[in-house]
Image (spheres, helix red, strand yellow):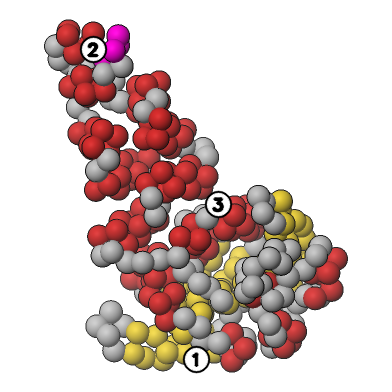
Amino acid sequence: METHKLLDRFELLYPQVSELADLRRAYIDKDMSSIFRLLPQDVTGDIDDLRKAVLENNLNSLFRLVDDEDLRKLLLEDNIWKLWPVLNRYTDTHFVAAFKNFFVNETKIWEDCFARGQLQSKQWIVTELEKLDVELGTVFLCAGWYATLSTMLFESNINVDNVRSFDIDQTCVDIAKVFNKPWLRNDWKFQASVANILDIDYNSHTFAVTRSDGTSCNITSAPDTIINTSCEHILDFDKWYKRIPSNKLVILQSNNYFEVDEHVNCVVNEDEFDKMAPMSNVLYTGELELEKYTRFMRIGYK
């Protein structure tokens, strides 16, 4: 993903961190006011460098006055290796290490996983769950893709014990493990496995996982919460939903983005989504207006 896009997404994810907005403007526009807010308070150097920095907007002179080599190389040399320590300076998220891993290993990922609409939709889940103050326990993340939602759940104030992400694509499983590496290493609080969600036993499921040494083993998990943020992709949605036992906490999202060929199960509004996924106890239902479509969400007990 291009640097300016990553900076935009981190600013979107962490709006409370004003330095990220300054960093984006400093990188894209070379905005002097933003750069000054990012620089250290201690200034030393030659008076002529100060003159050039102030009167000529000379960034090279400006950086000769302050000790911030990482920021200088990022802004003036477009050195992406310096993006990671600068982002780590202002954030406390594994997303930085994950994207550094993809960059270093030249891993190809589908950038849509960090599209604005995708991030806003997942932020919406986190926000509403924090308001509801429910305990998620063990989560089954169905059609989990890269499991970026898992990263966001673990880094939030939400009470979650474990996340098990299932996707039919092995490459998605491998990338999901990079995004969630700290929790993969922490007694497998996170694990990902290849599976068709129509084949999962939502009472208690045994599935194969791959260890770090390449060997495989089976583990068994019983979900307390089932999440599917890709209901628009599920052709046999009714068949899948019937497999979920009563009284399980369920979190679902769909949309009205009919223009995408893979969206085989879109809904036109909240009412249609409600009828498609009935719940015995609805905790939340709502919609989120995004740039190209409306996202719908239901949280409750089946």
Which image quadrant for residue 253? bottom right
What residue would you read off at disc 3?
Answer: 116
In-image side of 277 versus 20 (left or right):
right
Residue 284 at least partly seen: no
Q: Residues within 10 Å of mark 3 (few under 14, many from 20)?
A: some
Residue 233 at least partly seen: yes
Is disc 2 placed on a helix, strand or loop?
helix
Q: Along the polypeptide, which appears first: circle 2 or circle 3? A: 2
Q: Which residue is at the front of the view, 159 or 240?
A: 240
Give the image location of residue 93, x and y in percent. Answer: 40, 52
Quadrant in which the C terminus appears: bottom right
Q: In the rendered image of this protein, does residue 67 appear above or below residue 260?
A: above
Which numbered marker is on residue 52? Answer: 2
Q: Nearer the viewer, mark 2 or mark 1?
A: 2
What residue would you read off at disc 1?
Answer: 206
In percent of the image, x 24 and y 48: which residue is there? 81
Q: Looking at the picture, which amino acid does disc 3 mark?
A: Arg
Quadrant in which the N terminus appears: bottom left
Is disc 1 placed on a helix, strand or loop?
strand
Q: Along the polypeptide, which appears first: circle 2 or circle 1? A: 2
Q: Residues within 10 Å of mark 1 (few under 14, many from 20)?
A: few
How many numbered discs sit on the rendered protein?
3
Q: Along the polypeptide, which appears first: circle 1 or circle 3? A: 3
In percent of the image, x 36 and y 28: which residue is there? 30
In percent of the image, x 52 and y 40: which residue is there? 15
Give the image location of residue 115, x and y in percent. Answer: 52, 55
Is disc 3 placed on a helix, strand or loop?
helix
In-image side of 230 versus 164 (left or right):
right
Q: Looking at the picture, which amino acid does disc 1 mark?
A: Thr
